[in-house]
Structure formats: C-alpha cells, structure tokens
C-alpha cells in the first residue's frame, strides 16, 4: 500500500518587493526631471515684469528677441531680415509669443511687430515675468 503524503502549506507566498520599489523610485525621479525641464532659447534674455499671467496655447511659436536685435526661433538664430525663413512652415494662424529682453529698445520691438504683421501673423503675445511683491 502506497502512502500519500500531503503537505499543507497555507502560508501565502511572499514576492520580493525590492524590484517594485526600484521601479517606483525610477519613475519618481523620471517625472521629477521631466516635469522641471523647460525649453531654452538660443540666447539669454531678461523679460520685463508684469502683474498678471496667462497660460499659452500648445501650438504657440516662441520667438526670442535679444537686446541687440538678435532673433531666435527653436535652434535658429538671425536678424530681422531672416525672420521669414526661421518661422515654421505652418505659422499662419498660430500665435507667436515674443520673449524679449527688458533692455530691448521699443523701436526694435515695433519693427519686429511690423515685420510679423507683414508676414501674416495676427496673434502676438509679449512674455513677461511676474514681479514679486506687486499687488
């Protein structure tokens, strides 16, 4: 006669938690870094101050305008004469956000606005920084 031996193991199987914890921490680090990244322009600017702020639409073209008249869009740099070649192909109907330095002469900004109007841009926003302590 054969005997059957049954081993009753009612204890739950414990899975190792270390791989799960590692993945959670890697995701946490990824989202912390990805959330703080901001697209930088082709040169440094110091924007003028403002007391209000608005969110910009997703399809906005960001145009950097330096105090010496340099213009930058994405990775392209140039002057006012190269503006039409630096704009994306589908720029008509899209808003343009101008990030100008606070020391830029007003006449240069007006010349840029006139050139954008000649090219058919009808939605222009001037980016400013919120000044602390203003109520």
Image (cartoon, rainbow, N blue to C red):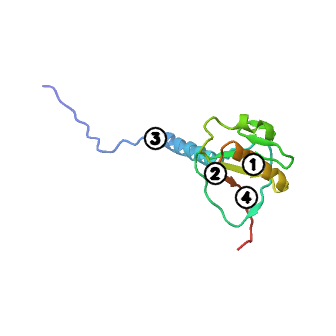
Residue 54's spot in the image, x, y percent? 62, 60
CB under 8 Å between callouts 2 and 1?
no
Farthest residue in the right direction? 68
7 left or right of 101?
left
Q: Nearer the viewer, mark 1 or mark 4?
A: 1
Depth order, front residue of 30/133? 133
Q: Secondary structure at mark 4?
A: loop
Vertical relation: 48 (above or below) 59: below
Residue furthest bottom as drawn: 135
For mark 1, what is the residue? 114
Contact between labelled residues 2 and 4, with CB atoms less than 8 Å apart: no
Instruction: Answer whether labels 3 and 4 touch (C-beta < 8 Å).
Output: no
Task: State the residue at coordinates (77%, 52%).
Answer: 100
Q: CA distance from mark 3 to mark 4?
A: 51 Å
In the structure shown, which secondary structural element does the residue marked by tag 2 occupy?
loop
**Mark positioned earlier in the residue sequence (1 or 4):** 1
What's the distance in space between the residues labelled 1 and 4, CA to CA?
20 Å
The residue that label 4 is drawn on is: 128
Eye-nearest disc, 2 or 1: 1
The front one of 31 and 8 is: 31
Residue 49 against residue 78 in the figure, above or below? below
Label 4 neighbourhood size at 10 Å, few (<14), some (14-19), many (20+)? some
State the residue lying farthest toward the left.
1
Residue 16 is marked as: 3
Locate residue 14, reporting x and y percent.
40, 43
Sequence-wise, the earlier of marks 2 and 1 is: 1
The residue tagged 2 is 123
Quadrant of the image occupied by residue 49: bottom right
Q: Which mark is residue 74?
A: none
Disc 2 packing (10 Å; few <14; some 14–19; many ≥20): some
Q: Earlier in the sequence, mark 3 or mark 2?
A: 3
């Amino acid at each position: 006669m054969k005997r059957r031996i049954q081993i009753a193991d009612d204890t739950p199987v414990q899975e190792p938690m270390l791989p799960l914890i590692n993945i959670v921490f890697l995701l946490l680090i990824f989202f912390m870094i990805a959330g703080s990244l901001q697209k930088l322009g082709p040169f440094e600017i110091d924007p003028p101050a403002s007391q209000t702020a608005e969110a910009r639409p997703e399809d906005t073209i960001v145009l950097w305008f330096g105090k010496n008249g340099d213009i930058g869009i994405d990775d392209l740099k140039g002057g006012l004469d190269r503006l039409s070649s630096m704009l994306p192909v589908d720029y008509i109907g899209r808003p343009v956000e101008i990030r100008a330095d606070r020391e830029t002469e007003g006449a240069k900004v007006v010349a840029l606005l006139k050139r954008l109007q000649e090219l058919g841009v009808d939605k222009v926003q001037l980016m400013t920084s919120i000044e602390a302590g203003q109520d």
